[in-house]
Image (cartoon, rainbow, N blue to C red):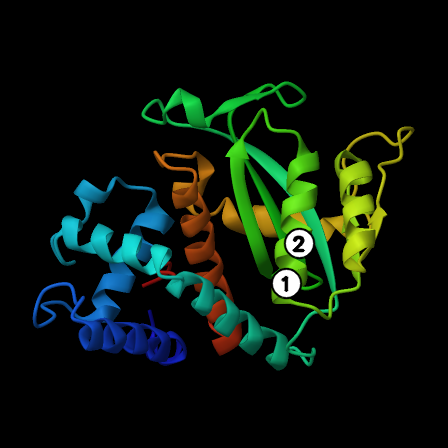
Amino acid sequence: MSDARWNLVEPVLAAWRAERHKKGLSIGRPPAHDLRSLLNAILYVDRTGIPWRYLPHDYPPWETVYGYFAHWHNDGVLDQLVERTRLHVRTAAGHDPEPTACVIDSQSVKTAPTVPTATQGIDAGKKIVGRKRNIIVDTLGLLLTVLVTAASTPDGPAGIHLPATVAAAHPRIRKAWADSAYRTAAIEHGARLGIDVEVIRRNSAAKGFFPLPRRWVVERTFGWLMSYRRLARDHEARPTRPEAMIHLAMIDLMARRATGESTPTWRGT
């Protein structure tokens, strides 16, 4: 991470470490590794898709890196970083910090051979054996919440769970857009939450690809996520771990947007 992006996320990580020291739960007494190098190592795994054991020796030991990754996920640190970076991006774009509308959609991805069969399924419509990512984003395509299930799980249950989660965290949301797979459960449950869910249907007469109103925003977010090779195929044994990897990818993306930076390149050097 650049200095600007590190300054954006460092307060959350420093507060987490200080709290663990206060409770006597610190990892390694005193800490043997810098928080910035640990975060860089985790982002390296997410971006390149390598196994944890293949981390370059420039980074801390992979066991330590994975330990911090697990603790940050379990302790809600990644959620805090998503909230913090999204707030900065929305503010920089001239939007209110709290969203009032959102878009929901799902994506099925294949799983690695090491993923337990009990946590995956078959998406008959897309002919994919793997897991399904259900996400809700704001109107800028920034992540609000994510739920990973077996690919065989219908979109209906996610259409109930996700809006409830978003409504609790963002009570100002009053409008949502979704595809026809969410039409019944999401509309009815959204009405109970005070959220107007509008279904955007594809024109059956249209041929080829064309962007759908509002829904193109969440489709673009899925495109952003697929540039992280750890997310191109689900390698995680636990369904909650790919959720953490999605959070990390969005933290990286939103931190770049908040600081006006782009992905570094070595072309022409």
Q: Nearer the viewer, residue 140 or 121?
A: 121
**Residue 168 position by quadrant:** bottom right
Q: Measured from the top left, where is residue 18 in percent x and y?
A: 24, 78
Relative to 145, say whether 223 is above or below.
above
Q: Residue at x 36, y 24 (%)?
A: 116
Left or right of 228: which side holds 215? right
| Rendered residue at 50%/44% (across/down) | 226
Label 1 sits on residue: 168
Considering only vertical position in the picture, is 160 above or below 131? below
Image position of 83 (left or right of 61): right
Determine the image quadrant of residue 51: top left
Left or right placement of residue 62 versus residue 197 in this view: left
Task: Tell me if residue 175 can be seen.
Answer: yes
Q: Quadrant of the N terminus?
A: bottom left
Query: What element does badge 1 sit on?
Result: helix
Mark 1 is on which residue type?
Ala
Badge 2: residue crowd in 10 Å (few <14, some 14–19, many ≥20): some
Q: Amino acid at mark 2?
A: Ala
| Residue underneath mark 2 | 164
In the rendered image, residue 225, in percent from the top left (x then y), is placed at 51, 49
Of the numbered discs in the image, which one, if any, rests on residue 56?
Answer: none
Identified at 37% across, 27% down, the residue is: 112
As measured in the structure, the alpha-carbon distance from the residue carrying label 2 to the one carrying label 1 is 6 Å
**Figure quadrant of the C terminus:** bottom left
